[in-house]
Image: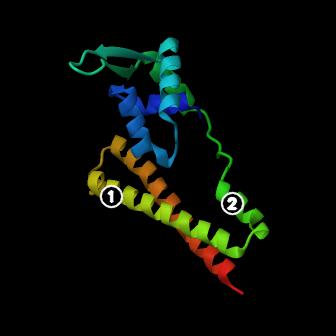
Amino acid sequence: MALAHTILAALGTESYSGYDLWKKFSQSIKCYWQASQQQIYRELGKLEKEGAIVSEIIPQEGRPDKKLYQITDKGIEILKDWLVEPSEPMAVREELLVKVIAAKLLPKSVILQEIKRRSQVHAQQLSHYKEIAKEKFSDVAQLSYEQKCSYLTLRCGIRYESNWIDWCEEAIALLSEE
């Protein structure tokens, strides 16, 4: 999967400025895809050159003009072509696991402290995701198909964070044994 597909999917039927799209990535999409503001703007430029998206300049008083991006029919076709391709699990690249493997080089307290810190990071993100679920998806039975799809990606993020917290607790208990 490329960042381009994620941007096309995020645009959906709405128009977004590059900044608003980046905020969407930072707030909800980050549970499955992360991108910097610079990466998003660079990809928007490529997608526009390809004809997958178009932009509209909205003049603003006292501020720079706003550029809104919208998916085109060609962009929808690109997204549809990609959607029917089989997806493969992505390779795990997790720095904490590399640190655990190499932890024997330092006192045990160092890796325990890092695992505890990571558990807190995941707990904060889990809390954030649960708040979004409560605000936007309080009655799952009443969700439209599109909303259910969004909800399922959020649920995956919730389970991801919960799994990390569980693993951290297990790791702390095991490494604390003497």
| Residue 167 can be seen, yes or no | no
- The residue at 32%/28% (across/down) is 14
- In depth, the one of 145 and 124 nearer the eye is 124
SS at mark 2 in the image: helix
Of 110 and 157, nearer the camera is 110
Name the residue carrying label 2. 97
Residue 90 x/y as whole percent? 65, 45
- Residue 68: name its quadrant: top left
Q: Could you tell me the amino acid type at mark 1?
A: Glu
Category of crowding for the residue at label 1, using alpha-carbon neighbours closer than 10 angstroms: few (below 14), some (14–19), many (at least 20): few
Q: Which mark is residue 131?
A: 1
Residue 123 located left or right of residue 62 = right
Q: Position of residue 22 (x, y in %)?
A: 42, 35
Q: Residue at point 58% right, 32% down?
A: 2
Please report contact status of discs 1 and 2: CB closer than 8 Å, yes or no.
no
Q: Position of residue 167 (x, y in %)?
A: 59, 69
Q: Quadrant of residue 81?
A: top right
Q: Secondary structure at mark 1?
A: helix
